[in-house]
Image (tube, grey):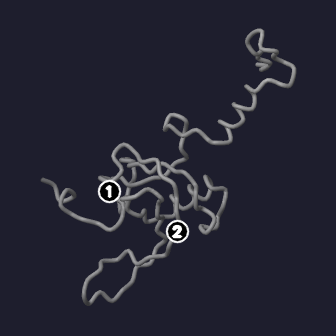
């Protein structure tokens, strides 16, 4: 058994994400991420992303993940990140203090993640609706999509 298997954390870690989690941001809160113990004097406040999905631990943001989410949400202000979909995954190629430790990264969801934007779905349905008088019921609707 490895130490990671028995170590508990209030925050997301690599064991929590598996091959990646598709998540929706609820809010970002500044939070003390330092150890909670009697006599702990120093606070280590960092932004933490909370997600709408139940049972998912918050993600402590580093500068890289902060910038990535800002780009995905097209907002630098974390107050406007709510509702943004992201994928949190483990990247084994991250270095920390001169060691390759791996770490959590965030990326924009892709269609292979099973994400279909509602706007795209609505647009597709609108394209499939015939215009008035275009289909009199005598045959299939003519597809006027130009490629």
Q: Is residue 28 above or below residue 13?
A: below
Q: Secondary structure at mark 2?
A: strand
Q: Position of residue 145 (x, y in %)?
A: 77, 20
Question: Mark 2 and mark 1: span between their CA atoms?
Answer: 29 Å
- In this figure, what is the number of numbered marks? 2
Disc 2 vs disc 1: which is toward the camera? 2
Q: Quadrant of residue 122?
A: top right
Q: Position of residue 126 (x, y in %)?
A: 74, 32
Q: Quadrant of the C terminus?
A: top right
Q: Quadrant of residue 42?
A: bottom left
Q: Secondary structure at mark 1?
A: strand
Taking the view exactly as shown, the residue that stands out farthest to the top is 138
Query: Which is nearer the eye, 14 or 94?
Result: 14
Identify the residue at image location x=50%, y=73%: 29
Decide if residue 90 is on the left or right side of residue 81: left
Query: Which is nearer the eye, 44 or 80?
Result: 80
Decide if residue 38 is on the left or right side of residue 126: left
Q: Is residue 47 above or below residue 38?
A: above
Identify the residue at image location x=47%, y=60%: 51
Decide if residue 123 is on the left or right side of residue 117: right
- Tell me if mark 1 has few (under 14), some (14-19) or many (20+) residues whose alpha carbon lies within 10 angstroms of its own: few
Decide if residue 7 is on the left or right side of residue 72: left
**Which residue is label 1 attached to?**
99
Q: Position of residue 56 (x, y in %)?
A: 38, 58
Taking the view exactly as shown, the residue that stands out farthest to the left is 1
Sequence order check: which comes first, mark 2 or mark 1?
A: 2
Q: Position of residue 113 (x, y in %)?
A: 49, 38
Q: Is residue 136 above or below residue 56?
A: above
**Which residue is label 2 attached to?**
28
Please say if the residues under marks 2 and 1 sit with CB atoms less than 8 Å apart. Answer: no
Identify the residue at image location x=80%, y=18%: 144
Identify the residue at image location x=51%, y=58%: 65
């Amino acid at each position: 058994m490895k130490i990671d298997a028995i170590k508990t954390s209030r925050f997301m870690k690599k064991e929590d994400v598996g091959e990646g989690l598709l998540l929706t941001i609820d809010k970002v809160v500044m939070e003390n991420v330092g150890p909670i113990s009697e006599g702990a004097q120093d606070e280590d406040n960092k932004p933490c992303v909370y997600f709408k999905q139940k049972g998912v631990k918050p993600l402590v943001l580093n500068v890289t993940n902060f910038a990535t989410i800002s780009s995905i949400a097209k907002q630098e202000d974390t107050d406007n990140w709510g509702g943004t979909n992201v994928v949190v995954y483990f990247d084994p190629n991250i270095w920390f203090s001169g060691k390759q430790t791996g770490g959590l990264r965030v990326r924009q969801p892709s269609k292979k993640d099973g994400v279909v934007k509602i706007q795209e779905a609505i647009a597709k349905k609108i394209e499939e609706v015939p215009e008035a008088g275009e289909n009199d019921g005598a045959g299939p609707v003519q597809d006027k999509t130009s490629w």
